[in-house]
Image: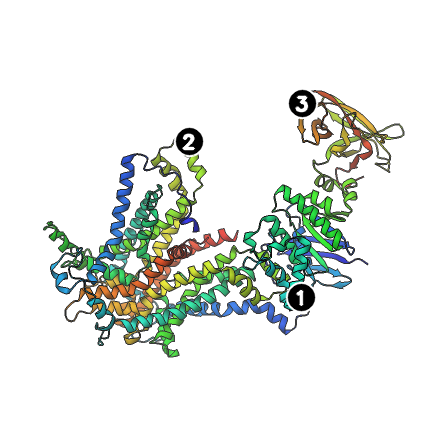
Amino acid sequence: MTIAATRSEPFAVGRPGLVERLQVALPKLVLAPSFAAILLFVYGFILWTLYLSFTNSRMMPVYELIGFDAYRKLWAQPSWYTALQNLAIFGSLYIGLCIVLGLLLAIFLDQKIRGEGVLRPIYLYPMALSFIVTGTAWKWFLNPGLGLEKTMHAWGWTSFHFDWLVNPQMAIYTVVIAGVWQASGFVMAMFLAGLRGIDGEIIKAAQIDGAPAWQLYRRIIIPMLRPVFLSAFVVLAHLTIKSYDLVIALTNAGPGGASQLPSTFMYSFTFTRNQMAVGSASAIMMLMTIVAIMVPYLYSELREKGR
Amino acid sequence: MAFLEIIGLRKRFASMEILKGIDITLEKGGFLVLVGPSGCGKSTLLNTIAGLETISEGEIRVEGRAINNLHPSKRDIAMVFQSYALYPNMTVAQNIAFALEMRGVPKAEREAAVAEAARTLQIGHLLKRKPSQLSGGQRQRVAMGRALVRNPRIFLFDEPLSNLDAKLRVDMRVEIKRLHQATRATIVYVTHDQIEAMTLATKIAVLKEGEIQQVGTPYEIYNRPANLFVADFMGSPAMNLMDAVVAAGSGRTEIRLTREGGEIRLPIPSSVTADGLGEGRKVVLGIRPEAITDRNGADRTSKAIEIVEAQVDVVEPAGSDTFVVTRLAGKEVTARMPADADVRAGARVPFAFNLDKALLFDPATGLRL
Amino acid sequence: MTSLASVAAPAGPVGGSRLGKILVYGVLLLFALFFLLPLFVMIVTSFKTLDEIRDGNMLALPVAPTIEPWIKAWGEACIGLTCAGIKGYFWNSIKMVVPAVAISTMLGALNGYVLTKWRFAGHKLVFGLMLFACFIPFQSVLIPMARILGLLGLANGTPGLVLVHVVYGLGFTTLFFRNYYEAFPSELIKAAQIDGAGFFQIFWRIILPSSGPIIVVTVIFQFTNIWNDFLFGSSFASGESAPMTVALNNLVATSTGVREYNVDMAAAMFAAIPTLLVYVLAGRYFVRGLMAGAVKG
């Protein structure tokens, strides 16, 4: 008999006076400023950006619609293709490696490890750092002259050569390394929570059925972590598309624009190259990618929760 | 004049009608129990009395005055919730005093009232604790204290005992009954437990799918159920219900029940059915387990004892009684025999039916005949 | 999710054999090194002299530890045209973070309260729209925001950044509190209504005193996010009014003169210390915030 009890409806007020009407409206009045702010600053601004992407705005916005010109320009830009290609490389490696590493570490940590309380925070602390700090640290660590390469030489591995940071072909991979370093601990925590949430009796049952350890994981535990895979994918995909700070700090989208991502592309076209309409168009493309990933996910999550 | 009147109350959620025209009255000092299976609308009905849910139609009156447009805090009611709903951040004393504080009662008065309620419920030693430090039974007492201190016109209880273990539930039931007898408070109480309903109520309303099935005293509900639903719902073990056909008797009504390898005929006393039932009419015979016993256990004052030999299916010793299950008319039939009755599964034993206690129902409408 | 630390591990079937155990511990320790290495290098470098950096091994401990780089990073390093270190920017960040976190957390609590306990027709849509606002790429609001801040006269400074962070943090804070209050028994609200408490009385007297954990989670999440923000900082605050992350990036990216790696690292440490401190002190809540932002429910 708790079906109806979970609803707390506003109650009836007979012949409402001003005070009572205010009382009833109070919750909505409290929520209104926040909701209005989000409507304006998020949805209003998105429409504004969309509008700008159909104009010929350069340094300053102009409001004369000229159609799809900016999109044509955008898709004619070689650097936009570089950005998309980098997004694909970065996204697939970042998401893939984070999930593989995160799952591996979570499973290993779940073996009644002594010192788990020490290891777990070590894996996770990079998530507390600013991407700018991470970028600065890795930039120094991977510095071709003074960093890893020099250390290896000092240790006697004189043929060791590592110049990805300044190599246009490889620069995007340094972003992958730093990104995976930052986020895989977080993915580990998600998987660990998932593992700890599995009903222990199922595992006992499987062990009694005689499943060896690797079979237990392959056939029973990992399939049960499906929701975590989905969540991890969505979170990482979202982080991928928003990634901006890390690239700026690590490679500054260089060398020569070689590690450009859509986010850096948008910023440079809008604010330094005075191509606001093209910048808006690229922002809209980013938004649409996020919408394609997030909306189905959020919809299913909310529906599940709403019962 | 009735103290609490509920008149033609309807409640709709979207296109679903949850309460379909409820009419109940309760006299001052009465103890009304709303009982029914999950989803029958009994908690919704209680919430509408409390003002926690709006009503779509109808009226709720207390002492002749409509209250259904008043805010819950203005209705002069107190409510005890299933989860107790104690404020987790406040001590027991603060919990009990909260409603008085909200009404601007001075501190000294509040403290006196809290002390009084604590004495009645014997929770004086708990006043400084937080709800998380209390056992289930103690929380229950505090929740009652919070209601008691208000001295409201009506107390509402929403399944207050369902979160307690079996033994504590019995204790608290007695406690609530004692409290009611001592305070003569007017109480509306929701439960799905028919034993609670029977033991506590001065008046029971049985609900099903948003409709009242029967309102009456516990005695009426138990012994003169208005229909098959009430008959089946109230009582544990449930009433035996068997399909039967009216057979013409010589001057008196007899019914026929099929059984394995034949049929039996049972005479129905005129006290059970006033009107003559036509021959061949289908009926449902209802008879409670305690009206079927062994030969020694049969009620000596009854003139309508019929002995039926039948094979025992299962024997369930329950300590104070032994329940014996057999099959008649294609249904399981439970008899309540003395604890020392010598019956074994598989044996054929005589069952003594006290047909004074029998009831007949119309299988089509479900109503009692 | 709270069980992360407390629930005992189930069967640990991988490391049944001794070899398995060694493998498991080996891999775990290796990755611990991988995660610690950059921080280690950053710290040791920040205590070395430039000569030692040029001649020595990146991984070696400083031969002659010096706090000179830290002093220089804090008060003397050149960022842009001024050479007054990063201390001014550090305070900029503090002045931005404190009000932004306080306001967005407060509003989030009220919103969550309304969206769970005072529901109205359309509450799901309202929440859905607020929730989605968490996930938009901020590039899609950057240009209009710049225009509006310009019109409001907040284009270049801390108040503008506070406004931006409050608005774009609201989705998350509302989400956190909504999910927390969703599990808060509605019967308590009903009881309080019957007891005569109004909307704000229930909030102050009953809801808020029980919200300790979620307030900590939200504050930490917002603090970390806003402190670490770079995109808004670099877009809406330049020069003297820039926050810490922007100043750090400018310092490190400055290409004039001798590269002072030790000063760069010390400055990076200044930017990292507040959030690291929070992580060390309240890691459990930090993780809960991350999880709540990722997996709803």
Of tags 2 and 1, the one toward the viewer is 1
The amino acid type, in three-letter code, at marker 3 is Ala
User: Is B267 rendered above or below residue B87?
Assistant: above
Quarter where residue B363 is shown: top right
Residue B98, numbered circle: none
- Residue B45 visible in the shown view: no
Q: Are marks 2 and 3 in contact (CB under 8 Å)?
A: no
Residue drawn at point x = 47 percent, y = 64 percent: C108
Residue B239, position in %: x, y? 73, 36
Which one is in front, A35 or C217? Answer: C217
Disc 2 crowd, CA 10 A, few/some/many (<14, 14-19, 20+): few
Q: Which residue is mark 1?
A: B109
Residue A208, numbered circle: 2
Which one is in front, B129 or C93? Answer: B129
Residue lying at the far right in this picture: please name it. B251
> Which numbered disc flags the more N-terminal residue, 1 or 3?
1
Residue A305, position in %: x, y? 50, 52
User: Is C257 rendered above or below residue B24?
Assistant: below
Q: Chain of mark 1?
A: B
